[in-house]
Amino acid sequence: MASSTRGPVTFGTRVALVATLVFAVSVWIGLVTASAEGSLGPHRATYEITASSSGVVDLGPLGTLEVDSPLPLRLGARVTVQEVPADVTSIDAPVTLEGLSADLDRYVQFFTSPETFLQDAAGDVVRSAARHTLIAFVGLGAAITGLLLLLGPGRRTELWQLGVRRRRTSLAGVVVIVAVAGAVVATGPLGPDLTASQPASSIFDGTPLEGARLTGRLAGIVDTYGGLALDAYRENEEFYAGAEDSLRTAWAAREEQSQEWARLLELSERVSPLQRVMLGDPDSLVTMLVVSDLHCNVGMAPVLKAAVELSGAAVVLDAGDTTVNGTQVERYCVTAFSNAYRAGGAKDVVFAGGNHDSAITGEQVRAAGGTVLAGEVVNVAGIDVLGDADPLETRIGQGTRRTGEEGAAEAGERLADVGCSRDEPVPLLLVHTPAVAADSLERGCAVATVSGHLHRWAGPQRVEQGVRLVNGSTAGAVSGQATVGPLGGTATIGVLRVSPEYGLVADYQKLTVDRLGQAEVGWRMPFPLPAGMLPEREDPNLPPGAR
């Protein structure tokens, strides 16, 4: 009979085996104990990973909404929505309807881009799971190390040499540990499966929540009032899909005429020699897309993606008011827009916070990979850009006030000092409110300034020693109207081509989408040079068609 010999297991192998088992248990504990605070529609919510295979939205006394979990390893998720009243019956119908109407915009935003909610939540939960895994690994490792030290080397060797029986016992012990750990951590977030026998709600057919199941009072409420939000969602989807198609069609039509237009510009006496040099080498120019005053209109995301893609923009200049109130729950707006820019091909987003944004918004932009201006010059794609958040903040129900000691004049003077401290003026100053750029224009500390806030396009025009461009609202924002749903006004997007070599904007384009969803793509027009750089023969004002 053949015999086999087995060499002694080395100390390193033993340590590696124990560490692997401890790590596996720690990962499981980390996963099923992970949680994060986020948002769901207009509500704050807590996200947790569970040991079930379902995604459950818990609305407390209202009931639950359940969908099949997309997570691997039969893991599920539970979203506990906050701000749900404990006694639903205490709210009369008129108040409930009024509340539903007030929150409708946020629900439409949720249905429009649910993946952005989930993306933000998933990132937070993964980070929580990593922290919990590390804590569990360190804790279990310390406990095992302490136990082994107490046993001493002789007893450790004796236990290890018990052979197959000992190994089987150890394996059984590990299985028990995993089972107990999983059971203990899952009892809280898992709970009984009350929705397995519930039929799917037909009201979600044709939406990202198709197949969802409802329980409790929530089923009746959604069946009764859910159509309001879903009708608005479908109208929203159709409008912006049409707007995107219109933009693509208008861009293609304009491109067909671009060569003839370029030839006419080449012959025009209104184009300076320096502009001819820059425009004659388009490959050397950096394309930047200008947006402002989006006010959480995530319906514009596909239109913005198309604008970035068609223009070939490498950078997006966001002149602020990306949100409505600068809150944590508006993080999904920042994520939705950032995803759209990246999907279109943009490499960076440069953000100057507006009065409707906040420091929280700035952190959200950073978390999404953007560059947040904070009073210093940054270099993006070879272009120096200066800017800062708006010195004022506007909060719903609280009005407008200063965020610190500065007003527009003081903030503008500070930025001008930074711009003028250089050997050459900063090529671009990006701020939210045009008034903040006034001092830089007057003193010649910035070649060109880009801003928003006014919800109407103005310029580009020479002002003092620089050139000012004010972008209109990219959300089509109109005073007193919500920025969710089909556009209430004309949405405006700017396209700039900038020369890194000369630090000048070579030309610009104006893109618009009107209330009917019809897009218009303007001609590429030479961007005015500052007054100090004008040839004597050049008219200091471009023709009306360039406005």
Image (spheres, rainbow, N blue to C red):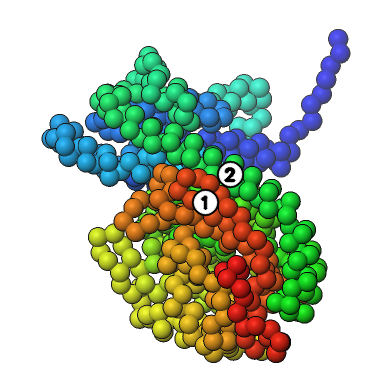
The N terminus lies in quadrant: top right
Amino acid carrying mark 1 in the image: Val
Residue 370: x, y in percent?
57, 60
How many residues crowd around disc 2 within 10 Å: few (fewer than 14), some, or many (20 or more)? some
Which of the two residues, 360 or 394, is positioned nearer the viewer here?
Answer: 394
Badge 1 element: strand
Residue 322: x, y in percent?
46, 58
Does any portion of residue 342 appear in the rendered image?
no
Left or right, 523 with reference to 512: right
Amino acid carrying mark 2 in the image: Ser
User: What residue do we see at 56% from left, 29% from top?
Assistant: 72
Q: Which residue, given by chain and number where applicable, does mark 2 sit on?
A: 246
How many residues crowd around disc 1 within 10 Å: few (fewer than 14), some, or many (20 or more)? many
User: Within the image, what quadrant is residue 188 found in?
Assistant: top left
Q: Which residue, given by chain and number where applicable, does mark 1 sit on?
A: 513
Left or right, 26 with reference to 161: left
User: What residue do we see at 35% from left, 35% from top?
Assistant: 229
Return the disc, 1 or 2, that comes first in the chain's sequence. 2
Give yes or no for contact between labels 1 and 2 (Cβ–Cβ under 8 Å). Answer: yes
Which of the two residues, 54 or 209, is positioned nearer the viewer here?
Answer: 209
User: Within the image, what quadrant is residue 5 found in?
Assistant: top right
User: What residue do we see at 44% from left, 72% from top?
Assistant: 433
Does any portion of residue 259 appear in the rendered image?
yes
The C terminus lies in quadrant: bottom right
> Please, is residue 62 above or below residue 527 in the view?
above
Residue 462, numbered label = none
Residue 66: x, y in percent?
40, 26
Residue 180: x, y in percent?
45, 28
> Please, is residue 333 above or below residue 89 in the view?
below
Which of the two residues, 417 or 254, is positioned nearer the viewer here?
Answer: 254
